[in-house]
Image: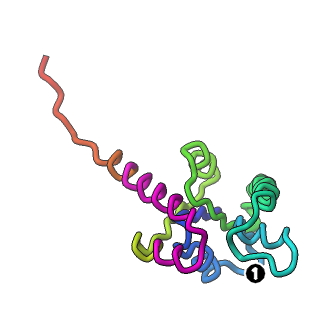
Amino acid sequence: MLYVITGPPAAGKSSWIEARAKPTDIVIDLDRITRALTGPDAPQWNHSDIASKVALRARYAAIDEALKHLDATDVYLIHTMPSAKWLARYRRHGAEIIAVDPGKDIVMQRIADMRSPALQAVATRWYAQRARQRDARRVTRQASRAW
């Protein structure tokens, strides 16, 4: 099974996975990948641009390979704000899309306490995108005209 975990920065996506994934499952988490590719004592978050670019390429390769093995193992994939194209790809693979969101106030406080202030903009975009998606699902039904 493919589980795609979405949510703003500092929402608890990694913690959600840690509470559920088994040791034999595949976990694709950009922060974990970046830490694996950087030297000792590298920061847990707030990575350099180069480390982030290298890790992102490794993440794409990991996704491509993991999708080939969904019949044999569960895959947990963190994707903060997947585009419509990525969501369609994940759904083609039968993904369960899970949004982890403890609330905007908590997220913003966690970012202020632990993360780069630049992530506040990412969180703001996540909440704005989520609101637009909710609004798009609110469709007013209108009776057809009698011609």
Query: In the drawing, does residue 82 fall left or right of residue 72?
Result: left
Q: Residue furthest top?
A: 147
> Which sits in the foreground, 55 or 4?
55
Q: Residue furthest front?
A: 117
Give neighbour class at mark 1: few <14, some 14-19, many 20+ (Cα, 10 Å). Answer: few
Residue at point 43%, 59% (across, down): 127
From the top left corner, tell me how far across and down residue 33 is, in percent.
78, 67
Q: Quadrant location of the C terminus?
A: top left
Task: Verify whether residue 64 appears in magenta.
Answer: no
Q: Amino acid at mark 1?
A: Pro
> Which sits in the foreground, 105 or 71?
105
Main SS, magenta residues: helix
Q: Which residue is mark 1?
A: 23
Residue at point 60%, 69% (across, down): 116
Residue 23 to residue 67: above or below: below
Mark 1 element type: loop
Callout count: 1
From the top left corner, tell me how far across and down residue 35 is, in percent.
79, 72
Span colored in magenta: 108-132
Residue at point 80%, 53% (across, down): 57
Q: Quadrant of residue 69?
A: bottom right
Q: Is residue 82 visible?
A: yes
